[in-house]
Amino acid sequence: MWATKHMCSIQRQWPPLKEGGLHGSIFFKTRQFWTGVLGYCNLRATHVKSTYNVQNEWLIMDMTTAVVAEEVKTAYGKGPKATYDGRQLMMEAKMKHLNLSFAACGFLGIYHLGAASALCRHGKKLLKVVKAFAGASAGSLVATVLLTMPENIEECEEFTYKFAEEIRKLYFGAVTPGYDFMTRLRAGIESFLPSNAHEIAENRLYVSITNTKNGKNYLVSNFASREDLIKVLLASSFVPVYAGIKAVEYKGEKWIDGGLTNGLPILPVGRTVTVSPFSGRLDICPQDKGHVDLYIKVAKQDLMLSVANLVRLNQALFPPSQKTMESLYQNGFDDAVHFLLKENWFE
């Protein structure tokens, strides 16, 4: 089948195509054309106001990429013809502009660490093309780890286990009088965060925080110093009453948990791959099998209404046993591997 190597930057709806039929399109600006059999190719294009369903898969249009099949030939103008591997082209198209976002989840952040470990081990090509990392609450912490210090994931895992053990031993958990949740969390962040973390994170890390004055959500991506980055991460993790009484001060204003207003940031440009320990309409998450396929929107997350998710909500604030947390870590690892295999990014 034939495909143009480059396509013009027009914006128009694609004509209706019939399954199994041979179809073609001409792009007058560049005097190029596309032709192929629907059902045996994947069509992607950018900056077009429409999407097109090919092989039962909704794809964002990307005008810099044409058609993908098991074997694709390109012809443009009077230039030479060449053969390309279709799967490689499809991978390049999907990874044109990729973001990675981790959901708010409290102590279930151990699931995120498992997913991050799998991405580091089996998704290196994917991570190389990720433009931005985002997160809320515990998700913002893991996004920071993956961006600025991926080599410390195992150390962060051990810190999470110890932190959870401290909370479990307290009679009233994190709200036990005299226990300073935020001081303990800050000590952990400072022990792992590299000195130039704010420079690495500049315009690549988007942290969800909530302003106490107007209740609005903000995604912070500019960090003047390491201390500023730490304050933003602490603000994103501050659950009122649970983590303390005084909100985190940053740039003259007070901020609290970003998960309350935007628990899973979706960035406006490109595709955002979503990671969450809650089952729902997400890329990397547990797959609960409920009798009724119902979803609820919680802080901009589409979560399945299931008993398992209700249990997870409780575990987010009241950490489960060490054995259960180790299982959650492994679940995150396995779910991330499943995603990489499904998307042809596994290595």
Image (tube, helix red, strand yellow):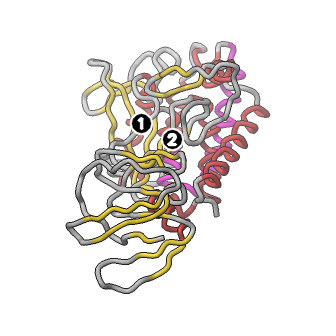
Label 1 neighbour load within 10 Å: few <14, some 14-19, many 20+: many
In x, y percent, where is residue 339?
Answer: 61, 49
Q: Which amino acid does label 2 sit on?
A: Thr
Q: Total number of numbered labels? A: 2
Q: Give the range drawn in magenta.
A: 142-171
Tell me the quarter of the image containing the C terminus: bottom right
In this rendering, the answer to whether 69 lies above or below 200 is below
Residue 75 seen in the current view = yes
User: With 328 as the anchor, is 278 left or right in this view?
Assistant: left
Q: Residue 265 carries which label?
A: 1
Residue 155 seen in the current view = no
In x, y percent, where is residue 71?
Answer: 54, 72
Q: Which of 185 and 330 is in front in this view?
A: 330
State the predominant SS element of the stretch in magenta: helix
Q: What residue type is labelled 1?
A: Pro
Q: Which residue lies furthest to the right in this view?
A: 323
Q: Is mark 1 on a helix, strand or loop?
A: loop
In x, y percent, where is residue 177?
Answer: 57, 13
State the CA–CA distance, disc 2 to disc 1: 9 Å
The residue singled out by tag 2 in the image is: 274
